[in-house]
Image (cartoon, coloured by chain):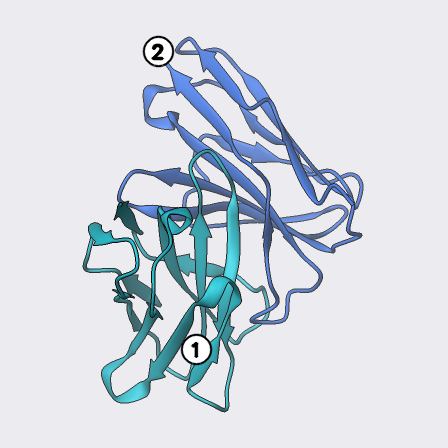
Chain colours: A cyan, B blue
Amino acid sequence: AQSVTQPDIHITVSEGASLELRCNYSYGATPYLFWYVQSPGQGLQLLLKYFSGDTLVQGIKGFEAEFKRSQSSFNLRKPSVHWSDAAEYFCAVGARAAGNKLTFGGGTRVLVKP
Amino acid sequence: NAGVTQTPKFRILKIGQSMTLQCTQDMNHNYMYWYRQDPGMGLKLIYYSVGAGITDKGEVPNGYNVSRSTTEDFPLRLELAAPSQTSVYFCASSRSGRGGDEQFFGPGTRLTVL
């Protein structure tokens, strides 16, 4: 069965500093990988996704993520954080079999200090 | 397009009461999903539907029922509410069931069972 681990429950970062959120997955083959962001009181919005090909994926809002097969990781990064990036971030893995069911990690809550 | 809409936004139930969480999408998506979100646990799939008249269980279906009579609507029914069902519920939809197809999320319903 597939699983996702986000080791950091909370991260506090200063505005303008860089941000990296960790995600490790378990899956028998090459998975589909996603990062979603949830702003307070809102639903989830897709930041970026990896299917195949280039292992460095660009997303919206200046985020990028790198797929590393050898480490079973898909870490999310942003070079310079804005106060509006304060939110909860979820990594998810999707099976390549039909059904499009996602398995989510527990989430990382990001706080941005002025 | 409104996307995925959910009603109500908030609800408090007493133990043993029943209620239906409504979900509607206007994107003509075939696949629809119900998730519950508990703190630190990410999102867990309750039920999903591959089209009108076809539903299937997800990871945590006990205590819930669904139906899909139209493409647009996918209501979630709680028959005998229990405190363990206190959670935030998200509905999502995707165009197809192909692995990796983006899921679009509603704003959520926060349910408390006392």
Question: Mark 1 — residue?
Answer: A31
Is B63 situated above or below A27? above
- Pointer 2: residues within 10 angstroms few (<14), some, or many (20+)? some
Residue at x 37% of width, y 25% of height: B86
Q: Nearer the viewer, residue A100 or A21?
A: A21
Query: Which residue type carries mark 2?
Result: Leu
Q: Chain of mark 1?
A: A
Query: Which residue type carries mark 1?
Result: Pro
Tell me where residue B59 appears, x and y as whole percent.
Answer: 42, 50
Q: Quadrant of residue A6?
A: bottom left
Relative horizontal placement of residue B52, taking residue A55 as reference (left or right):
right
Q: Nearer the viewer, residue A60 or A98?
A: A60
Question: Mark 2 — residue?
Answer: B114
Residue at x 71% of width, y 45% of height: B3
Q: Nearer the viewer, residue A76 or B44?
A: A76
Is B4 situated above or below A58? above
Q: The N terminus of chain B lies in which quarter of the figure?
A: top right
